[in-house]
Image (cartoon, rainbow, N blue to C red):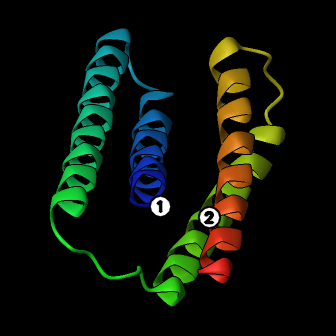
Amino acid sequence: MVADALDELSGAFVYRLSLYAIAGTLQVKKRIAKVSGVFQLAFALWGFVEVVRRFIEAEAIPNPLIMVILSCIALSGNTASMILLGKSKTAEAHIKSSQIFTSNDVIANIGVIAAAVLV
């Protein structure tokens, strides 16, 4: 759950940066791609540290209400992104890949909400 939440958070940052880069020069796009990669790596490392920490330390059961709330926020953001991407008239690879990744994130959000309800 923590890894999924971090993945969703990094996705939000990367989307924001990508939207900024659309109208930018090639140099700006390259710089933003590097920053996006740093965000992805940082959140992946954070997730790994959390997994190790929770394995070593005794951890209580996660609060399902917090999981549902955060997943619903992520779901609404991903759904809005999916709608905006669906309105795109371009068939460029980065738009198509964003559509696929976003639809996968929506499915993952629904899975996290279901898991939280079961917890």
Residue type indicated by callout 1? Met
Q: Quadrant of residue 48?
A: top left
Q: Nearer the viewer, residue 109 or 55?
A: 55
Real-space Cα separation, disc 2 to disc 1, in angstroms: 7 Å
Residue 10 position in % (x across, y down): 39, 46
Disc nearer the start of the sequence (2/1)? 1
Q: Residue at x 39, y 60 (%)?
A: 2
Q: Is residue 55 above or below residue 49?
A: below
Report helix, strand or loop for mark 2.
Answer: helix
Query: Hey, which quadrant is residue 88 in on the image?
Result: top right
Residue 69 percent coordinates (x, y): 55, 82
For the residue pair 54 and 14, the one nearer the viewer reads as 54
Residue drawn at x 51%, y 77% as measured from the top left: 67
The image's mark for residue 112 is 2
Secondary structure of residue under mark 1? loop
Residue at position x 57%, y 64% in the image: 74
Residue that carries the numbered disc 1 in the rendered image:
1
Residue plotted at (21% across, 74% down): 58
Q: Nearer the viewer, residue 31 or 70?
A: 70
Mark 1 surroundings within 10 Å by alpha-carbon count, few (fewer than 14), some (14 through 19), many (20 or more): some
* Residue contact at pointers 2 and 1, CB within 8 angstroms: yes
